[in-house]
Image (spheres, rainbow, N blue to C red):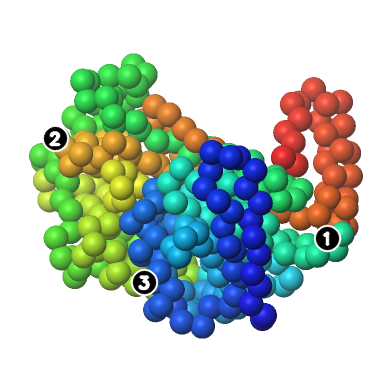
Amino acid sequence: MARVVERSGVTDPTLAPAAEITVSPVTDFAALGTKWRDLETRVNPSFFQSWTWTGCLAEERFTAPVLVEAREDGRTVALALFNRRGGSWYLGESGDPALDGVYIEFNGVLTETGREHDLTIACLRAARGGSEGARKRRLILGGVSGPIVVSAGETGYVLCNRSLAAPFVDLTDRSQDFLDSRSANTRQQLRRSNRAYAAIGRVTIDRADSLDRAYEYLDGLANLHQAAWTARGRPGAFAKPYFGRFHRALIASGFERGEIDLLRIAAGPQTIGFLYNFCFRGASLAYQSGFDYAGSGKHRKPGLTCHYEAIRLAASRGAVRYDFLAGDDRYKRSLANRAETLHWIEVADRRSPRVLVRRAWDFVAGGRRRASGFPVIPAIV
């Protein structure tokens, strides 16, 4: 792939001068990691934009990697790593479902703080490429927030394939227990669950204090997770060996950096469940879990009890946010006091065959839903 150099068009006079954008293949992931970590110190990224996540098994995941880089005054101000697959460019993902099952969220271009909008537009425009009037590249952006969707809309037509709520607990108010703002039913369910577990023994939460113990807790989590999902007739996240291999590598990279929490919650000697959380920039992100549903009994709610203990632990360590990530589990909705929405989108030309077919399908489907009295949920943003 040829090296392409562009100038981004920044129209807001309050912003810095236009950046030089380069689009080039990645040949040295170690060098990219150094550059990425340097930019991380000057930005406010999510964990999924960090090099700990992005660089994990990168050579295996990004088989045709392309880097979009923005530079101003000799410094890097934005980075975006894409993988080319099947004629599309995937931001932060491989495009291979077998590898992308690790499930990225809060995805986006890594940009200097305060420059997110203009630099995201500039980098996505460069990634789309193409001369004036020519068809541009199709981009796939998974797990992005609303502002990223808005920025993407400045570079092409946005198809929204899926949107999911991402509930979280705002811990910035230290004047009260976050549980005080939850419903009376949630408080009752949690207290009853905690009393039922306390009848076995004192409820405790333990963080793995070594890499070996972290792997031990991960294995325990995987066993409980798989048991729960196979009981429902579903394969479970750990059914594919790559999922476990990726996370063992991620833990090896992030544990010593303090970015990984493997937690065991127990009642006396009995395990209630395990949580696998990411710790990053004042947030605790509840990524994966394994609960002992078989031993829970009638009134015990392992999800509620485990996350409540983890939220208390996160708050005691100064976290300002406990993030449940995307999903609609009941305990997430019960404990969370706020939520964001994440979107899985693609950016294409307005008149591309895929967009035209999709628009026609959405028009027909919307008419059917209106005729049935159901609300129309737009698939195109």
Q: Nearer the viewer, mark 2 or mark 1?
A: 1
The amino acid marked with disc number 3 is Thr
Helix, strand or loop for disc 2: loop
For residue 34, the mark is 3
Residue at 43% from the left image edge and 29% from the top image edge: 338
Rendered image: mark on residue 199: 2
**Residue 85 position within the rendered picture, expressed as x and y whole percent measured from the top left:** 67, 72
Mark 1 lies on a secondary structure that is loop
Q: Which circle, 3 or 1, is nearer the viewer?
A: 1
Disc 2 and disc 1 in contact, CB within 8 angstroms: no
First in sequence, mark 2 or 1: give its number: 1
Q: Which residue is mark 1?
A: 132
Residue 216 visible: no
Q: Residue at x 37, y 58 (%)?
A: 40
Q: Residue at x 36, y 53 (%)?
A: 42
Using residue 205 as the reference point, say whether residue 89 is left or right of it: right
**Residue 329 coordinates in the image, percent (x, y):** 46, 39
Q: Residue furthest top?
A: 184
Marks 2 and 1, how far apart in space?
A: 71 Å
**Label whose residue precedes the other's in the sequence (3 or 2):** 3
In depth, the one of 121 and 239 nearer the eye is 121
